[in-house]
Image: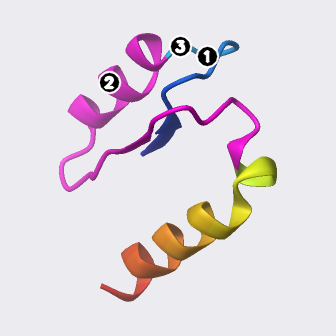
Amino acid sequence: VMHGEDDQIVPIANAALKSIKLLKNGKLITYPGFPHGMPTTEHETINKDLLDFITA
């Protein structure tokens, strides 16, 4: 679960913090200052972390 800590559309407490509890082998990565559109605005960071997770 990846979530920007500055997401004004879907607050982290209402989504990521609840979602991670439901995933047996989940991993939570939070991004200070990242907005709701972080996959677009912060794609270099997000893509690196996704690739690291997939190849681990």
Residue 6 in the image: above or below residue 21 = above
For this orientation, the residue located farthest to the bottom is 55
Which sits earlier in the primary sequence, circle 2 or circle 3? 3
Q: Tell me the kind of residue under disc 1.
A: Val
For the residues bearing labels 1 and 2, Cβ distance under 8 angstroms: no
Residues at marks 1 and 2, CA–CA distance in whole angstroms: 11 Å
Q: Residue at left 26%, top 51%?
A: 26
The disc placed on residue 17 is 2
Mark 1 is surrounded, within 10 Å at the Cα level, by few (under 14), some (14 to 19) or many (20 or more) other residues, namely some
Q: Give the x, y percent position of residue 22.
A: 26, 33
The magenta stretch is 12-38
Identified at 45% across, 20% down, the residue is 12
From this viewpoint, which residue is outermost toward the right?
A: 40
**Amino acid type of the residue tagged 3 in the rendering:** Pro
Between 21 and 51, which is closer to the camera in this rendering?
51
Query: Is residue 8 left or right of 2 when viewed as pictured?
Result: right
**How far is the residue under mark 2 from the one under mark 3?**
9 Å
Are dots 3 and 1 in contact, CB under 8 Å? yes
Residue under the image location 39 percent in, 88 percent down: 55
Q: Position of residue 21 (x, y in %)?
A: 22, 30
Disc 3 and disc 1: Cα gap in Å?
4 Å
Residue 10 is marked as 1
Identify the residue under disc 3: 11
- Residue 15 place in picture, x, y as percent: 46, 21
| Secondary structure under the numbered disc 3 in the rendered image | loop
Q: Secondary structure at mark 1?
A: loop
Residue nearest the observer in this picture, 36 or 14: 36
